[in-house]
Every structure is written in structure tokens, then in C-alpha cells.
């Protein structure tokens, strides 16, 4: 194969070659996928339908759930289908689409988590200015900027990557298409162009990470100055879910891409990819609802509406 135009499909890494374990992988991923769809779907419905949750914090949470739904739907269905039908193939265009949407959603989610850190900073450190700094006229552009950043980043990297000539076969050492795996198939020095774009994106990601860290330094300083224990507990309870999501998301993703080559292996890369691409979208709804009584009450109303007469429920749900 001398050029990417001659490649009609790529071969993804299989979790196992044993048929029984392939079916086990299918059912395990199906359970995770359904849990992610249910959890994020309930949060989206609860926030959209309960007017008590029409605040900046829950508006950003709704956007996060939308990104999570798209994020996990980019990789899991194809992996499940391959295990179910005992195949490894993904089409060239399907691989390009998977990389585009993967980057679009993962970068958009990271940018949104940065915006959510700013939301918590303003709510705790500048509460008197919260309505001014995070009104509806500010929240929508912030969310749009997060989505737009993901879109532009994905467009840049996907175009760069799939303009490279490929001559190292078509087998990828990952259960979904990702840029490092495609670059390994390149036979041209032009891959340095994509590495340059990756470095720029890395600096952008580092800037977001530094912003989140500095925001939480200020948040914790402000919380520790609150005189009442109840006030400190309430402030911490609104921050800890976001901090837990950021920590899970960034720690696994950073380790996956900057780990020393000496400890790299296909099996370790596979486990890390699952940790940062599958686990966060599935557990984020649980993390956010665990310590949030308002959200739990709204979700209970949504679940009750699904099984009971809507006329008996004090929530504006569609009939």
C-alpha cells in the first residue's frame, strides 16, 4: 500500500480471539453503554424540564451530558458490533468519521469542564457578581465556544492526519481509530506537520488545565474562610463532583498519551483507552447526582413521570 487512497478499511485491535470472551465483551460494553445512555438521558431530561434547574451550573451539566452521549456513542457501538460479528474491520471513511467525532467531543468536553470550573469559581468567590458574570447572555456563548473549539480542533487534526500517505499496512493497535495509530502507518516525513498541530493542541490543553487548577486554589481558599461548617460543606458539595470528573478524565487521558515508551504495550494502551473513553461518560451522571439533592429529586420526578400519571407530578414535563 503506497497511499491512503488505496486503503478501503482498517483493522481494529480485538479484545480477544476467543468467541466466548468476545460475546462477554459485547454484553459488558452493552451494559455500560445502556447505563451511560440512561444516566445522561435522565440528567438531560431533568435539567430541561425542571425550571428549578434552569441555572448556569445545570445548563453546563446538560451540555456535558450531551457531549458524553456523543462521546461514548463514537467508539462503543462499533466495538460491540465487531465483537458480536467476530470482525475487526472499519471502513476508511468510518475511521475518519470516528476520529473527527472523537476529537470534536473529547476536546469540547475538556473545554466545557474548564468553563464549569469558572462557574464554580464565580459562584463561590464572587457570589454577588454571579448573575452579572454568568447570565444567560454569557452562558450560551461559553458553551458554544466549548463546542466550537472541539469542532475546529477535530477538523484540523482529521484533515492533517488523513492527508498523509500510508504504507505501513492497515492494522491499528487500538479498539477504535485514533490519530497516534494512524501516524504509525505513515511513510512520509509530513507526519511532522500533524505532530506540530498536536503540540499546539497540547499547549491549549495545558492552559485549560492550569486555569482549572488555579480556579480551585482560589475556591478552596474561599471555602476555608467560610465560618460555618454547614456553609463549607455546601460549598464543597457543589465542587467535588466537578473536581472528581476532571481528575478522572485528565489523569487517565494524560497517562495514556505521555506514559514512558518502556511501559507501553497494546494491552496497557487498551485498558487506558477504556478508562478515558468509556468510563467517564458512564460514571459522570452518577458522580454529579450522588451529592446533589436537587438533581436527585428532579431525576426521581422524571422516573416517576415515566411510570405514573403526569397530572399528579409537580414538574413541567411534556404530555
Image (cartoon, rainbow, N blue to C red):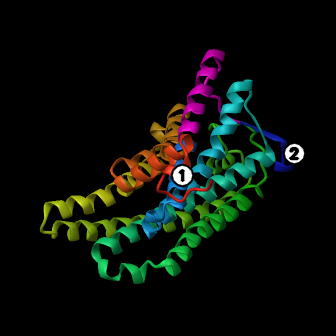
Distance of mark 2 from mark 1, alpha carbons?
60 Å
- Report which residue position mark 1 lands on: 311
Between 158 and 213, the residue placed more toward the observer is 213
Span shown in magenta: 12-36
In this view, the residue farthest toward the left is 227
Q: Is 27 part of what is drawn in magenta?
A: yes
The residue lying at 20 percent from left, 64 percent from top is 231
Categorize mark 1 by other alpha carbons within 10 Å: few (<14), some (14-19), many (20+).
Answer: few
Instruction: Report whether residue 144 is seen.
Output: yes
In this view, the residue farthest toward the front is 311
Assign the magenta stretch its main secondary structure.
helix
Between 70 and 197, the residue placed more toward the observer is 70
**In the visual, does 8 lie left or right of 126?**
right
The residue lying at 60 percent from left, 32 percent from top is 30
**In the visual, does 141 lie left or right of 89?**
left
Circle nearer the viewer, 2 or 1: 1
Q: Which mark is residue 227?
A: none
Q: Position of residue 306 (x, y in %)?
A: 56, 43
Residue 112 position (above or below residue 313): below
Instruction: Report whether residue 258 is seen.
Output: no
Residue 80 position (above or below residue 17): below
Upstream in sequence: badge 2 or badge 1? 2
Between 162 and 65, the residue placed more toward the observer is 65
Q: Which mark is residue 6?
A: 2
**In the visual, does 234 lie left or right of 317?**
left
Q: Position of residue 90 (x, y in %)?
A: 76, 39
The residue lying at 21 percent from left, 67 percent from top is 223
Amino acid at each position: 500500500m503506497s497511499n491512503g487512497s488505496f486503503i478501503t478499511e482498517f483493522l481494529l485491535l480485538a479484545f480477544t480471539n476467543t468467541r466466548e470472551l468476545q460475546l462477554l465483551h459485547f454484553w459488558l460494553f452493552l451494559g455500560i453503554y445502556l447505563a451511560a445512555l440512561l444516566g445522561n438521558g435522565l440528567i438531560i431530561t431533568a435539567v430541561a424540564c425542571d425550571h428549578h434547574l434552569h441555572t448556569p451550573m445545570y445548563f453546563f451539566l446538560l451540555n456535558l451530558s450531551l457531549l458524553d452521549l456523543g462521546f461514548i456513542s463514537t467508539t462503543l457501538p462499533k466495538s460491540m458490533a465487531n465483537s458480536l460479528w467476530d470482525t475487526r474491520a472499519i471502513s476508511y471513511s468510518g475511521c475518519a468519521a470516528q476520529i473527527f467525532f472523537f476529537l470534536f467531543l473529547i476536546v469540547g468536553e475538556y473545554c466545557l469542564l474548564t468553563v464549569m470550573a469558572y462557574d464554580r469559581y464565580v459562584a463561590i468567590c464572587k457570589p454577588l457578581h454571579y448573575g452579572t458574570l454568568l447570565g444567560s447572555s454569557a452562558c450560551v456563548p461559553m458553551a458554544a465556544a466549548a463546542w466550537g473549539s472541539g469542532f475546529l480542533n477535530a477538523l484540523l487534526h482529521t484533515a492533517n492526519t488523513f492527508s498523509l500517505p500510508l504504507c505501513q499496512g492497515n492494522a491499528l493497535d487500538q479498539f477504535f481509530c485514533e490519530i497516534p495509530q494512524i501516524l504509525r502507518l505513515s511513510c512520509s516525513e509530513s507526519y511532522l506537520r500533524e505532530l506540530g498541530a498536536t503540540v499546539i493542541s497540547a499547549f491549549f490543553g495545558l492552559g485549560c488545565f492550569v486555569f482549572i487548577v488555579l480556579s480551585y486554589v482560589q475556591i478552596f481558599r474561599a471555602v476555608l474562610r467560610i465560618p460555618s461548617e454547614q456553609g463549607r460543606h455546601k460549598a464543597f458539595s457543589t465542587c467535588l463532583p466537578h473536581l472528581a470528573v476532571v481528575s478522572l478524565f485528565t489523569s487517565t487521558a494524560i497517562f495514556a498519551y505521555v506514559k514512558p515508551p518502556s511501559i507501553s504495550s497494546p494491552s496497557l494502551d487498551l485498558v487506558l483507552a477504556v478508562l478515558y473513553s468509556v468510563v467517564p461518560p458512564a460514571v459522570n451522571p452518577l458522580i454529579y447526582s450522588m451529592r446533589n439533592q436537587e438533581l436527585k429529586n428532579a431525576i426521581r420526578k422524571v422516573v416517576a413521570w415515566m411510570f405514573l400519571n403526569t397530572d399528579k407530578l409537580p414538574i413541567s414535563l411534556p404530555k
